Amino acid sequence: MTATAPREEQLWSRCAGCASLLYRKRLRRNLDVCPECGKHARLGAPERLRQLVDPGSLCLLPDLLPEVDPIDFVDVLPYPHRLTAARAGTGLPEAVVCGTATIGGHPAALAVMDFRFLGGSLGCAVGEMITRTAERALDDRIPLILVTASGGARMQEGALSLMQMATVSQAIAALREAGLLTVSVLTDPTYGGVAASFATNTDLVLAESGARMGFAGPRVIRQVTGRALPEGFQTADFLLRHGQVDMVVQRRSLRGRLAALLAAAAPGGRPARPPVPRQEPASYRERLTGGGPVVDATRGAPVDGSPQPAGRDAWDTVRIARHPGRPTTLDYLDSVFDGFVELHGDRLGGDCPAVVGGVARLADRHVMVIGHQKGHTTAELVARNFGMASPAGHRKALRLMRLAARLGLPVVTLVDTPGADPGVSAEEHGQAAAIAENILALTVLPTPVLAVITGEGGSGGALALAVADRVLMLQHAVYSVISPEGCAAILWPDRPAAPQAARALRLTAPELCRLGVVDEIVPEPATAAHDDPAETAQRLRAALLTNLLPLLDVPPAILVRQRRQRFRRFGAARAGTRAGAR
Ligand SMILES: [Zn+2]
């Protein structure tokens, strides 16, 4: 051994993923992500903060001098000795570093846990520091970001550490009540009491690529069940598939992703830069429609007399509404909106592929967009369950609607579903109640809601996204209580009668406008949307803006009252007819 050997070792480190020997400086430049296999090495809190926040913006909160040993705990070593060793080893007073900073120019309060310090365990001092960070966020009216890395509650502080789960959660509840965004970033590993409190009860949960999160650790589960665990159990991708996290983010994208989410949650859902000056309503129309046809909201007919294809049969419209080339929600998210950040999962065990949602910009205003997703090819349709939402899909939508209301974001829904998933599993998981809950939640949601029937508006599954202040409908979309086939099978049992049923159901846009179910028709180009998706997108965008902007000025209480009146009138109309007939 030569004298240079130790220094050589410090220059190199071995990847825990692929065992490659890596030059440390190169690894650090790559944010401690292995350039060979992509393994994200664990980061201490100071390095994590350095990677996440804008340079020079970090302002640390004062450290606490914690009570050293609240229950005089002794195992093989007295607890104070372990604390002293952890402090010496990390240079940190405790297992969390807290402060305020900006990310992409947006202010936030941050608490970042450090696994090196007694396994990032949650003791009284850690709980108190995170709580104070949350309270600081509340005082400053800024979002809170928690970066978690923890084995769980700190045993050496007994039940007092268990109580920290409640203490911090309470502070998060206050931020939710105040409409301030809370985000947790799960890093490897996040377990036990931290996982079962502030790591997952925030508005948004991001998982760093490769991070594992769970309540019980894999060793315990193996012992208890006596079974081998599935490949990738509790990893970020597993969590995404099972609806536990909004997204999995590579370390190099984390800062940008957080900046985008903070931008969406900025006051009024608007970007940090000055808002676009408001225009007069008349010039809006001209500017936004770009000379395209404008629809008379009261009658639903194109006011410039652009052709409503004469005598098109309702059954033909059904077929156009189902055309595989028809733009989908993801197509519109690409063409009508900007900067879509998709949010996943119902937090209860599922992420339904038939419903997509997230924050996006519509002409520089942030909105929450939620829609059914079908597809253009058979493979896409199968992967998306033909746009038929499971209970997990409805619960994901519900979660995003409520998040939008808390953050003051308007909700735009794009409805295109043959109906809710009619499968066995859907029934087992409470499909009916999931739809019912969404209808209820939308009825009282204290933020503008704008729904667009873009393709098929199938029954309760459609209404679960369509209790709105304004309901728009693309010209060749359909909206119905039951599919024509379903109706025909029940009422015309002897012969195939779907076309007759389609006519009888009054499911086309002009007829629904007449009935008041729909407020406005968005004209489609040429023969239909699938012939010119770009033009369709432009018209949809214009219609969204024309309808959304006036709603932004209405106080939420009045908005909700008017929305309830809008849906109350259908019962009144029916009763009136009956009274008149008597
Ligand atoms: Zn590697």
Image (cartoon, rainbow, N blue to C red):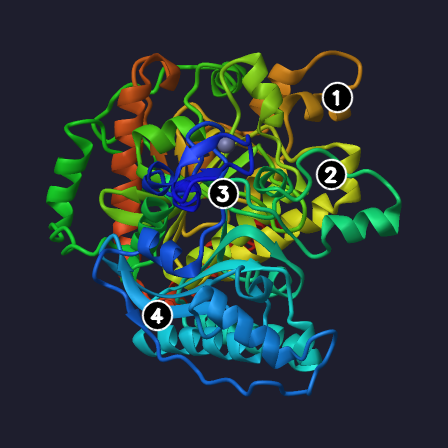
The answer to whether mark 1 is within 8 Å of ligand 1 is no
The label on residue 99 is 4
- Sequence-wise, the earlier of marks 2 and 4 is 4
The label on residue 243 is none
What separation in Å lies between label 1 and label 4 (alpha carbons)? 64 Å
- Sequence-wise, the earlier of marks 1 and 4 is 4
Label 1 environment density (alpha carbons within 10 Å; few <14, some 14–19, many ≥20): some
Position of 565 with respect to 169 (left or right) is left
Q: Does dot 1 land on a helix, a strand or a loop?
A: helix
- Sequence-wise, the earlier of marks 2 and 1 is 2
The kind of residue tagged 4 is Gly
Residue furthest to the right in view is 226
Point out residue 334 in the picture as x, y percentages from the top left corner: 34, 29
Label 3 environment density (alpha carbons within 10 Å; few <14, some 14–19, many ≥20): many
What separation in Å lies between label 1 and label 3 (alpha carbons)? 42 Å
Disc 1: which residue? 489
Point out residue 426 in the picture as x, y percentages from the top left corner: 73, 38
Disc 3: which residue? 247
Say which residue appears at 52% left-offset and 51% top-offset: 187
The answer to whether mark 3 is within 8 Å of ligand 1 is no
In-front residue for pair 525/190:
190
Position of 113 with respect to 310 (left or right) is right
The kind of residue tagged 1 is Ala
* CB under 8 Å between discs 2 and 1: no
What separation in Å lies between label 2 and label 1 (alpha carbons)? 23 Å
